[in-house]
Image (cartoon, rainbow, N blue to C red):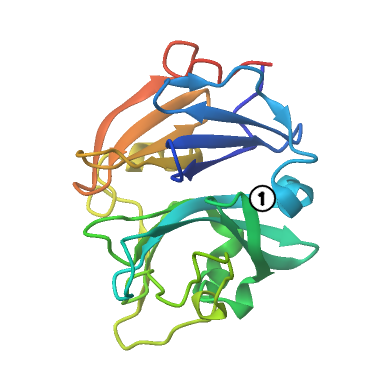
Amino acid sequence: MPKLTNVVAVDWRAGKDKFYFFYKNTNTYSRFDIDDNKVADGYPWTVKGRWATFDEHVKNLLFGFSTTALTLDRPMDRSDLDILWLFYYEHETPMVCAYNQDTDKVMDARPVEATKWKRLLPYFDRIITGTWWQVNRSSLFRFILNDGNSLYLDWGETPQNPKVDYASDKYDDNLFKPVATPTQTTRLEPITETTWPGLAPYKDRIITGVQKDRTLADNYYYIFLTDHQYLIYNIPENALVSGPHSVNDESWPGLLRN
């Protein structure tokens, strides 16, 4: 069975919500369908030939997460753009790929240094997992590091960009460019009962994490640990809900399938 030792989990928001788990040791992946509460039949699949032009980089993937940019200030019906941000290395260069979930295509891939994510660079090698801390559709992101610390990143703006052309799938460079505002905040914090209530006892066992965007309920962050266990963390409440629980065929049907 796939071992949850060198795995990266990411969330997918376009269409029916789901999780993807990338098993880097075997260059395969599984799709967990949230509505069905199980891994779809036939998985795991090989990465090669899937994931558009990103397939060759999966083996170097470090972490990833999704965001939704709402068009609030354009003369059009309410629309959304679901982007899966994938952070990886290309040779020695930290990279980020913007994957359009609505078209299932790579929108762009650039060095992190040339993007608005450049403030992650001093911590890049240490990041295990991160997620959009979607509280009141904020611009806040939080990352868990491998040294007992976490990173608090706030752009001081919403991650919305009215210049995205949804109809033609053209991608405006401004979404990638660093944005300097006086309210931006980057803060390194130790994982304690104050910053991450309930998580501190497990800070040295974290291997990946993925957000569940729940309808009409608080979003949850599933944090996976060594020894095939996981925690459930409430994002708006910033509190541990429960765990650790065992990862098995009852809690995550099909996830450990060969």
What residue is at 64 percent from the left and 24 percent from the top? 3
Q: Give the SS element for disc 1.
A: strand
**From the viewer's perspective, is 205 left or right of 94?**
left
What residue is at 27 percent from the left and 39 percent from the top? 198
Image quadrant where residue 157 sits: bottom left
Hey, what amino acid is under mark 1? Leu
Along the line of sight, which residue is nearer the eye, 82 or 187?
82
Quadrant assignment for the C terminus: top right
Q: How many marks?
A: 1
State whether residue 39 is above or below residue 158: above
What residue is at 43 percent from the left and 20 percent from the top? 36
Q: Position of residue 46 (x, y in %)?
A: 76, 32
Q: Position of residue 24 (x, y in %)?
A: 71, 38
**From the viewer's perspective, is 164 left or right of 194?**
right
Quadrant assignment for the N terminus: top right
Along the line of sight, which residue is nearer the eye, 209 or 207?
209
Residue lying furthest top in this view?
250
State whether residue 137 is above or below residue 248: below
State whether residue 213 is above or below residue 162: above
Image quadrant where residue 16 sits: top left
Residue 144 seen:
no
Q: Position of residue 76 (x, y in %)?
A: 33, 68
Q: How would you rate the neighbour count of disc 1 (Cα within 10 Å): few for under 14, some for 14-19, many for 20 or more? A: many
Image quadrant where residue 99 sits: bottom right
What residue is at 47 percent from the left and 35 percent from the top? 18
**From the viewer's perspective, is 255 left or right of 49?**
left
State whether residue 152 is above or below residue 155: above
Name the residue that disc number 1 marks.
61
Residue 73 seen:
yes
Q: Position of residue 19 (x, y in %)?
A: 49, 36
